[in-house]
Structure formats: C-alpha cells, structure tokens
Amino acid sequence: MSVNDSTEPNRRDFLYIATGAVGAVGAAAVIWPFIDQMNPDAATLALASIDVDVSQVAEGQSITAKWRGKPIFIRQRTAQEIEEAKAVDLSELKDPLARNANIPGDAPASDENRAAEGKEAWLVMVGVCTHLGCIPLGQAGPYDGYFCPCHGSAYDTAGRIRSGPASENMAIPPFAFSDDTTITIG
Amino acid sequence: MKKTLSVLLAAGIAYLPLSAYAQDGAQEPVAATGDVASPEDAGVVAVEEEHAAEAAEEGHAETPHYPLKKPEEVDWSFDGPFGTWDLAQLQRGFQVYREVCSACHSMNFVAFRNLEALGYSEDQISSLAGEYTVQDGPDDTGEMFERPAVGSDYLPAPYPNPQAAAASNNGAVPPDLSLIAKARAVERGFPTFVFDIFTQYAEAGPDYIHALLTGYGEEPPAGVQVMDGTYYNPYFISSAALAMPQPIYEDQVTYSDGAPQTVEQYSRDVTAFLMWAAEPHMTERKATGFVTMIFLIVFAVLLFLVKRRVWASTPH
Amino acid sequence: MSGHSSYVPSNGIMRWLDARLPLPRMVYDSFVAYPVPRNLNYAYTFGGILAIFLGIQILTGIVLAMHYAAASSLAFESVEKIMRDVNWGWMLRYMHANGASFFFVAVYLHIARGLYYGSYKAPREVLWILGVVIFLLMMATAFMGYVLPWGQMSFWGATVITGFFTAFPLVGDPIQTLLLGGFSVENPTLNRFFSLHYLLPFMIAGVVILHVWALHVTGQTNPTGVEVKSSKDTVPFTPHATVKDGLAMVVFLLAFAYFVFYLPNFLGHPDNYIEANPLKTPSHIVPEWYFLPFYAMLRAITFNIGPIDSKLGGVLVMFGSIIILFFLPWLDTSRVRSTAYRPIYKIFFWIFVANAIMLGWLGAKPAETPYTELALIGTIYYFAHFLIVLPVLGLIETPRKLPNSITEAVLAKHAKSGGSVTPEGATASPETKG
C-alpha cells in the first residue's frame, strides 16, 4: 500500500531506515539481559573450587567428591592398574587426547598425561560418562576401569574410553595437590 | 563492559555542573531549615504535651509523630545520576562495621567475595575471610565442624539466632544490616516528594542512618519519657528513644589513611558502606540508565520526525 | 476483524497460507488496514502502551520466576539473590516492580480518557465492561505479586486484604481460611499467591484479546464523539496510528526507565526490605500507591449503617467503587459522547479527577482527624458522581453544537489555526468501515 506522498523520497527513506535500525538495535540490546540471566550467577561461580582431604584414601581405594554439582572420582590406583594403563598402545585408543584441563589440549592420552602430575598412582577425574552424562561404575567392565551401565561405554584404568558409544576420555578437572593429603579442585 | 562504564562516567562528568547545581538548589533551603530546627522542635514537643493533656482528658492516646527531627541531607559521593562509590570511604566504612557494628549486627546477604567491589584483591579477601571461622559439615562421621571462612562464605553473624540476639540485648534484636540503607526512610511529605523525582533524591536511607548515628547525646526535652534501657535520639524513626546506645565515639576506630577519626566521619563512612551493601549494583545501574536514556531520547526524536512526516498531508 | 477484508496476498506462499489459516489476513486487517479516526490525540495511545507493559511484566516475570523461591523461608532471600547475584537480576526485578506501577499509571490515564470521551457509551458497553474486568484482574495480580518478596509490607498487606473477607457475616471466616490455606498468612498462602500471580497475567492477556476484538468491531471513539461516517474520517492504522503509538510508547518508556534506573525504590515502601515478621506489624501500613484511593474509601467508613457494621461497610464501599464502573454505560444519560461538548460535565469531570487524587493522598495519611472526615466526603462524592451527577446532568445539560463529521471538525480546527488545508484529507484509506 502507498504509505505517503512525500516529495523527498530519499530523505524519507533514510529517516525510516534510521528509525527502524535504531529500534532494532534497542530490541537486540534489551534481549541480552533476558538471556544472560540464565547464566550461572555470581554465587554459583564463587563456589568454583573445593578442597578434598585424601589422607584416608589407601592404595586401591576411591572417594567421590562433588564439584560444580558433578561427582569427582579420586582414586589411588594399584600398581597393577597403572601397569595395565601404561601397557596400552596409544594408537588403539578411541580418543587420542588426554582431556586434561591441567595440560595443553593437544597432549596425547598417555597414562602420565592422565594421572596426577608427579603422583602417577592418583587419578582425579570428572566421573561423568562422556556419552550422555550418567555416572560410570568403578572397577568394572572389560578394561578393569569404569563401565557406564546406561549405554555400555567401557573405560580403562586411566579413564580412557575403549569401547561403547562414548567418544571422549573422561575429563580431568583443573586440580592440584595443595599438600600431600589435600587436593584442590577447580 | 568496565571500559564502557568508565567512558560513560567520564561523559557524565561533563554534566556534573548541571546536576550539582540542581542538588545545591535542593539542599540549601534544607540546610537553612536545619539551622533553625531546634526552636521548631521545641515547639513540636510542646504541641505534643498539649496533645497528651488533651488525650488524657478525652481518655484516648494521641499518636505522636516520629522522628522528632528530620534527618539532614548529606552530600554523598553516590547520589545523583552520575554518583559513584568512594572506594576509600567504603573500605573505612567496612572497617567501622567490622570493629564496631558487627559485635551485635549481622550482615547476612554480604559474602566475603562481594568485598572485591570495595577494591580489595582476591588475596586480601582470602586472608580476611581466613580470620573468621564458619561452621560447615556434616563431615564423614556426621559431625559439624569449624573451618576458616573462604570467599564464598557470607559474613558470619554475631548471634546464632534471633532468640540469642534478643537475650543478649535486653530483648531487642539488633536488625540485620544488609539492607538497612533501603529499609529505613523518613517520610518526605508533600510537596517535597514530588521535587524528589526531579532532583533524584534517593538517599533517604543513608541520610537517616547518618542522622541517627550522629544524633545521640542530646538531653531529652521536657515531656519526653525515656524508658530504662533505651537511649534518647530525636532522629529515631519510631519513638523518642531506642534500645541501641550510642554505638561509636571519637577515636574508637583507627584509620590508616589519615581520615578524621570523628563520629561524623565514622557515620558517613559506615553509612556509605551500608548503602553499598544494600545496593551493590548502584553505579552499574546508573551507568546503564544513562545509556538507556540516551537511546530512548534519540529513538523518540527519530519517531517524532517519522510521525510528523507520515501525518504531514493529513490534517488531524 | 469486521467488515470485508482488503488483504491481497503478495505471493504464492501467502496465498497458500491464506487459504488454510488466514492469520496474515487477520493481522493485516487488524493492525495495518484497520481504519482509525484521523483526529485521535495522544490520550488514545495508552492502549498500545498498556499492551507493551503487559508484555514487559510477563517477560520479566517469567525470568524472575526462574530464580524466585515461593517458600516463606526462602522467598526474601531468593529475591535478594536476584538483586545481588543473578546477572542483570537487579534490572529485571526493578523493571518488574516499577513496571507494575507504570502499568497502573497507564491504565488510569486510559480509563480517564474513556471517561472523558464517553468511550463506554453505546455501542461500546461490552468493550468497556471487558476493560473493567481487566482492571480487576490487574489489581488482583498486583496485590498477589506484592506479597511474593515476603517483606513486612507484603506480609501485612496480605493479612489486611485477605481480612476483607472476614467482614462478611457467617461465610467470611471460612472463606478467609480457605484463601490463606491456614489461620494466618503463611507458606501455603505464599505458594498459592505465586501460582495465581503467574496465571492471572495470561488471563489478562486473554481478556485483552477480547477487548481488542470488541474495539475492532465498534471502532474507536474520537475526541468529537461523532462516529466515523465515511472513509474521509479515517486513516489506516499503519503507518499513521502505529508511528504515533510508537512515539508515545517510547516517551512513556523514557519515564519508566528514569524510575527503573534512577529512582527504583521511590514508589516502593522501605519496610518491604525487612523480611516478613508475623509478630510485628509495621507502624503504619500503606498499600502501593495505585490502591490508595480505594484504601481511603475502605477506611472512610468508621460507623455502622443500620445492620451493616463499619467493617463490612468499608469493604462493600471499596468493592462497590469498582463494581459501579460496570454500570457506567447505563448511568450516563447524556446523548452526547464527548465531554469536549459538555461544558458543565467538563467541570464535574475534573472535580472527579481531583477527588480521586485527593482520595489517593488521604489513603497514605494516618487514619486520624481530619483525614478520615475528608476521606468520607471524598467517598460520598465518588459515588455521587456516578449515581447523581451522571444520570441527572445528562438530562438537564445543554451540550455545545456537535460537528457533522470528524472531517468537518478537523478542517474547522485547521481553518481556525490558520493551517493549510487539503480537503482531500485522509487519502490513504481505501476501505470503508463496515
């Protein structure tokens, strides 16, 4: 339909376009707070790190800590488990990357790159199956590591995916031994 | 975002003379009435006495109007459309809270991590938090245990529950201070409240707290009853005397930055801190408001031009 | 939504859709080609503004509900978490709280416009009644929303307002207990208020659709009160009304933003920053400003009227002050629609407005002499306006001469102000009103 009979089509068009553009910018700016409010709030972000006392975890034992609402498996592995993990040929692995937040992202998934730095017995990882988020069972499955009962993903003793629908090794969170018996996660 | 904010604030400074002028206009008359306040207040008390006498005759009590004196308007760094926090003042105010107020008053909604906004570094906050212990648990044996506080903990309260607080304070629970600067305001009355819209007066809470803290030490005028265990303060909002004795005296808190160690200065500092605690996003809010207002004005002008053009050939 | 449609699908896809679900046709007929009187002034823009504010309240409300906890032990804390920790939470909450106030500012101006230009008169009675229903729903929504932050005013406001029901003999107390889910305002009360506060805005939206539908059947009134007679009297909704409404919305939003960002607590009460305490009543309970005139009328009845005690009397008067609006179309006997042509009624209209403002002021004052007496006078006048002034004045007043048509009025105005006049007028309105 004819909007108007203006004698200056160019200036009129410019005015209309400018007004429409300003309106669009305003609408876009208003939308952002409505989306951003769904991001983690300041209190949630502040809970980013926890300290875990591991003095009671003997060789061959595990504990589970909670970090960001997820289970963190902390295990002092047996010599046999370490042996098994080291014996794996890296080319056999389904996921060749270490998935360790403490080292560069392209590091290979060797056992050294999966275990705690300088303490190869200790395995600290996010105990969440990388398939669809169930919690795998410990010391179970065909590779003596972890086995996810939901869809049958099997991990080895270093938490690396070996068979099943999952495609990534279980994630290693940012952590460090703040002293011999305390692990700081996050 | 931070950068944009500072640019906007800089832009704001260009407008400061204007807003300062507006504030002067609003404040001077008030200061003037403040000077002559004492005789007037004596009058108020006298009237109250008359009322009391009348009430006694008629057999019903007349409600007196509190506070007896209206708070004076203080010039805060955070007032007006471009107000900002004075970080040094907030830190001093926090010091006053820690060393004086926190003996009785909790601050349940403020976490140690929030103090970053006062200009403290993360390390300073960790070590500060470490000075406090908080209860955590239960541990693996099912027991609650004490541990040093961390940044995500909230400032520990002086009393475990309101009953304990009341028991230690003659039955009066010292209110939580997290929101006190927004939870108290002396009514401004008509027509002042209309002018407040244009002068953007939103500091009734801080002005009240400042007036209350500096308002002790006067002799109660004749006819005003002060009950045992309460302390006369003409600025108190709901009666002539309150359960809190004068909380702070000269030189009680030692400032490291050379600010005067007077009751006046302490009150200003702790009040500014309480305002921050009640409204931590205030400067962010005002800066966002500035952008929003500019945007809406530009948009309105454009729409006005479009509207005029659309209607140009249609008499209406 | 009425009359024949001038919509022509612009391409094949639109033609395909039009044959199956003529939604674009409906939008086109209602918001593009819909003819509006050419002489509407800015008082007619509040409908659009109200639509925007319903949208703002629903949107901010939905996101606030993502963080709010409707439990008496958590509510106050969760609101503070929104204010402190949630990204942009302070802004969303201040928008929602002040949005309620501005919603009422707009609705009162919208109602005042309706009263002034006689928008409630035949054939627009249903349109008007739907509007009163929306107003009632808004009041209920605002009241329940005010309870949610669980501050002192929330709690005691809820106690007082649900106390209205106890005024009714026999059934009153059981009804109050039913509403509260207990014997005082407690966790169950908060929970159900939250549920209803979330529900009612969507009911408002539903009634708004009916309100707009009814409007599009009868067409707008206009400042002359003379009905549209030909296509010359109207302009198409888009762009004429769209851009004018848009301008008014942005100016209104400017005032809204001023409060949200610079005076966010100006319209609130400081006591609501104190968590609810069932054992301590604030020294003086004041409702939100938009309820003050009604609150003044509630308190004005301090005496028994025959078998009706003062408490029930106050409640009846307060509810009556809104119920009476439903009957307004039949109380006004004047055959002239617009107050602009009613010289005597114009005076009474402004007295009514001043009286309403006075009642609002009295509602905020303590209940003592002389305020209660003034409130009683104001209350009597409020009802007298509807029950005496409107019916009687319509019969005895001599109105000014009405123009023959909107176009005539417009052209006469322009001739007087010396504006250049094109007799063509609204050329862009190809369709006639059905």
Image (cartoon, helix red, strand yellow):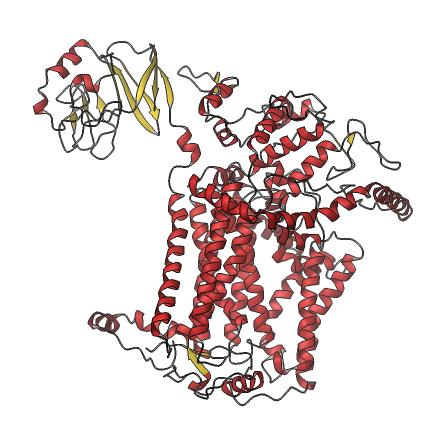
Q: Residue at x 30, y 24 (%)?
A: A174
In this rendering, would A67 be left or right of B166? left
Query: Percent from the top left, x then y, of residue B96?
Result: 63, 25
Tell me if I can see residue C312 in this picture: no
Q: Which residue is more in the foreground, C273 or B189?
A: B189
Query: Percent from the top left, x then y, of residue C257?
Result: 51, 54
Q: Quadrant of residue C395?
A: bottom right
In this rendering, would B126 be left or right of A75? right
Tell me if I can see residue C258 in this picture: yes
Query: Percent from the top left, x then y, of residue B65?
Result: 78, 45
Q: Quadrant of residue B261?
A: top right
Compared with B156, C415 (above or below) is below
In this rendering, would C399 be left or right of C29? right
**Image quadrant where one finds the N terminus of chain C:** bottom left
Q: Quadrant of residue A99?
A: top left
Q: Which residue is more in the foreground, C141 or B89?
A: B89
Number of numbered discs: 0
Query: Percent from the top left, x then y, of residue C359?
Result: 70, 61
Q: Which residue is more in the foreground, B251 or C304?
A: B251
Compared with C221, B263 (above or below) is above
**Image quadrant where one finds the C terminus of chain C:** bottom left
